[in-house]
Image: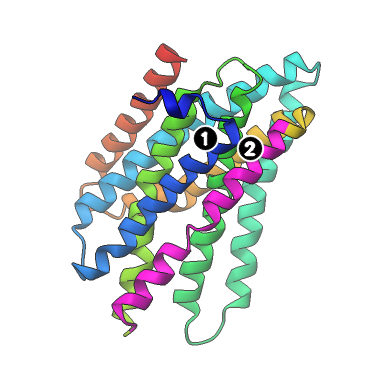
Amino acid sequence: MFNWFLNLNYVYQALLATIFTYFITLLGAAIVFFFKKINKNIMDAMLGFAAGVMTAASYFSLLDPAISSCEELNLTPWLITFIGFFSGGLLLFVADKIFNKIFTKKNKRILMLISSITIHNIPEGMAVGIAFGSVFYGISGATTLSAIMLAIGIGLQNFPEGSAVSIPLLREGMSRKRAFFYGQLSAIVEPIFGVIGAILVLKMRILLPFFLSFAAGAMIYVVVSELIPESQTNEKKDLMAIFTIIGFSIMMILDVALG
């Protein structure tokens, strides 16, 4: 069934995968046409599950292949992965701080919401592109299946993100069409940076370990600063934590057993 996808060039695979993650954001944003409020338990469970998937993917689909790639290229694994991982997390940290200072007017909360989610979608798109691109070199731990699962995990957490933008905009008095437009627009960067990530990996193999670990650091920042804290605002914190464990376990099993 998926043979046509597997036979595609890795750049096209990355493009289609990130179009999928964008489409899930679009579906989340489209909630404004049907509801003004989404069941919080469902939203938090999805966020918790996605946090688990993305955490596992950060190691099994990104950091582990980065270490293997360093060894193949005779680079120092701990140093390269540290620089890449720390840089990815630091970039998003700095971006958050900058936007906190830029937006000081009446619409600060909404502008920050749209901007922060858009910024977070950039490394997510790159992570998917890099994951597909790294398969090209046959690096240990890098498989098409793990790249697909990474895209699915990112897609899952994109649904509540899309609605997290469109619903507040609707509450602020914006029309449903405009609220939907800005909600889906926050993820349009994912296909763009997915292709960029895949191309960078294909053209510059020496930088592959850095890009892989960079994407992992950026994803972990999103998980720790956004997904887990948001899911833990639920009254059933322990249950949301279980969804995170389930997400991590499923991703780990797929990567280890089928990688």
Label for residue 247? none
- Nearer to the camera, 133 or 251: 133
> Residue drawn 62% across and 16% down?
138
User: Residue 224, relative to residue 75: is it above or below?
Assistant: below
Describe residue 7's horizontal placement relative to residue 195 as left or right. Answer: left
| Quadrant in the picture for residue 246 | top left
Q: Amino acid at mark 1?
A: Gln
| Residue at x 39% of width, y 35% of height | 52
In which quadrant is the N terminus drawn?
Answer: top left
Residue 182 in the image: above or below residue 254: below
Q: Earlier in the sequence, mark 1 or mark 2?
A: 1
Which color mode does the image show? rainbow
Q: Is residue 8 magenta?
A: no
Q: Is residue 228 above or below residue 59?
A: below
Circle count: 2
Looking at the magenta stretch, what is its main secondary structure?
helix
Per the image, the residue denoted by label 1 is 13
Q: Quadrant of residue 196?
A: top right
Residue 195 counted in the magenta span:
yes
- Residue 61 visible, this angle: yes
Q: Which mark is residue 198?
A: 2
| Separation of marks 1 and 2 at Cα, in angstroms | 9 Å
Q: Position of residue 119 (x, y in %)?
A: 56, 58
- Amino acid type of disc 2? Ala
